[in-house]
Amino acid sequence: MLSKDKNDLITLTGPGTPGGKMMRAYWQPVALSRELAGDVPLPLRVLSEDLVLFRDAEGSPQLIGRYCPHRQVDLSFGRVEAGGLRCIYHGWLLSGEGRCLEQPGEGAASTYKDRIRHPAYPCFEAAGLIFAYLGEGTPPRRPQFEFFAADKSSQVWAGKLHHDCNWLQAHEGNVDPQHLSYLHRFMSQAAALDPRGNALVGADVAPTMEVEETAYGFRINTVRAVGGGAKYIRVTNHIMPNCGSFGGVPLFDPATGPTPENAGYQLHFHVPIDDATHWKYTMLFSHERPLDPDFLTDKLFAEQKSYYSRRTHANRYLQDREEMRRVSFAGVGRNFFDHDKLAVESQGRGPIMDRSQEHLGTTDKPVMLLRRLLLQAVEDVAGGRDPLFVERDGAPNGLAEMRVQVIVETPATELAPA
Ligand code: FES
Ligand SMILES: [Fe+2]
């Protein structure tokens, strides 16, 4: 349970709010690379700010305020030109640094343009995502994910899915391993995408969780006793402030053979559009083999190709009671992303969940820690200090200790010599 005041601190992220300042202390994904093609500007709303993204002459992403500083025309209808983005109304030219380079109507001798300051935020592009820093002062070092390396680019895939709820309730699902035993269960192994995993999460619905705080957030070791002395252990992570990492998506087309265990992992970033909606950016990473973007985009995530699910609150997520009897516990198809979307969008239908009404149990231990770390980060930023996992040059890479793993430990392996 959380008081309204504390709930507000970590759910409201608009400009000037304490939670907004905390979220702005970190680099955030703002778009997929494939959304930003050629010379077509892309309108965005991030943390309740209206922005426009475009590529400069070198192809580098530039992020500036969406409305022209002259008389507020939408710059996403503008023309990308050498030097920046030109408003189509009276031709003012805005650079990616937020300078006004030309005001054709003012005459060549005018210095008025030099006094214009337009919102502009630094960006970088890696692994199919465009990240931006919307905070004040010097941006921290870019996060050092292993898949940002250029030679890993074929081993990463990125996608996104719109969510009709506040970011935090969705991210709390990332640190809630017990729900795998219910929300994502299939009624028979034949119906499951991963029959072995389905049997294992069903074998113990009251897992024990060991939570370890780390330089990036925390790690959860979730242990299920799955019979015969065997243990099913899932190692997953919270990465400050709005990212989770874990195993679980079939990385390769099952038609070409089963995905080897621990072949890679996925990350979910929950980035507020505003306080009532957010984008869930998903990254899939394969340790060794290249990924097949056609399989991932056209088959596995075919229904989410438009970045919106056809299952919404308005159509009750097309929940099917017959399917619930025979196929899946939730009755909303086989895609885990739809299961999660239903659960988190429906929480205290608000769209910001009222956490004063909940009754947390022992399996919510990681959720409690997540809120504590976020509240601490809000306090740190308000006090002028760098929060957890804001890394500056020279600091060690906190992500070096991140581990994502699935382990089935049998009594025989426990006894085997090291
Ligand atoms: S409104 Fe953009 S140049 Fe006038
Ligand atoms: Fe889930």
Image: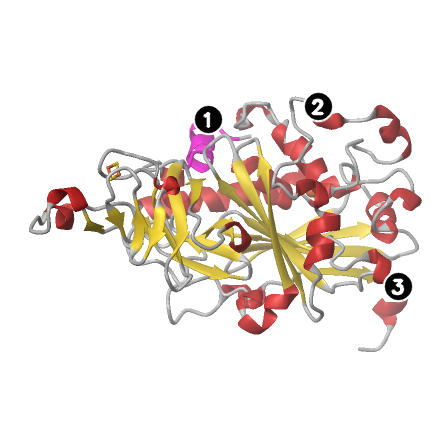
Q: Secondary structure at mark 3?
A: helix
For label 1, count other residues whose C-alpha is less than 10 Å away and answer few (under 14), some (14-19) or many (20+): few
- Locate residue 182 relative to residue 216 in the image: left or right: right
| Magenta stretch contains residue 367 | no
Q: Nearer the viewer, mark 3 or mark 2?
A: 2
Residue 239 location (% of width, % of height): 54, 53
* Residue 409 visible in rendering: no
Q: Which image quarter holds the C terminus? A: bottom right
Taking depth in this image into account, of 57 and 284 the one nearest to the observer is 57
Say which quadrant the N terminus sits in. Answer: top right
Q: Which residue is mark 2?
A: 316
Residue at the (76%, 60%) spot, across then down: 252
Q: Which residues are magenta?
A: 2-13
* Distance in Å between CA atoms under marks 3 and 2: 45 Å
The quarter of the image that holds ligand 1 is top left
Q: Residues within 10 Å of mark 2 (few under 14, many from 20)?
A: few
Residue 92: x %, y % from top left: 23, 45
- Give, as a three-letter code, the residue at label 3: Pro
Query: CB of mark 3 within 8 Å of CB of mark 2?
Result: no
Q: CA distance from mark 2 to mark 1?
A: 28 Å
Report whether 273 appears left or right of 198. Answer: left
Taking the magenta stretch, the answer to whether it contains residue 9 is: yes
**At numbered mark 1, what does the secondary structure look like: helix, strand or loop?**
helix
Q: Which residue is at a point 77% across and 32% down the rendered structure image?
A: 332
The residue carrying mark 1 is 4
- Camera-side mark, 1 or 3: 1
For mark 3, does the 10 Å Cα neighbourhood hold few (<14), some (14 to 19), or many (20 or more) residues? few
Residue that numbered label 3 is attached to: 411
**Mark 1 or mark 3: which comes first in sequence?**
1
Q: Position of residue 63 (x, y in %)?
A: 37, 50
Name the kind of residue labelled 1 in the image: Lys
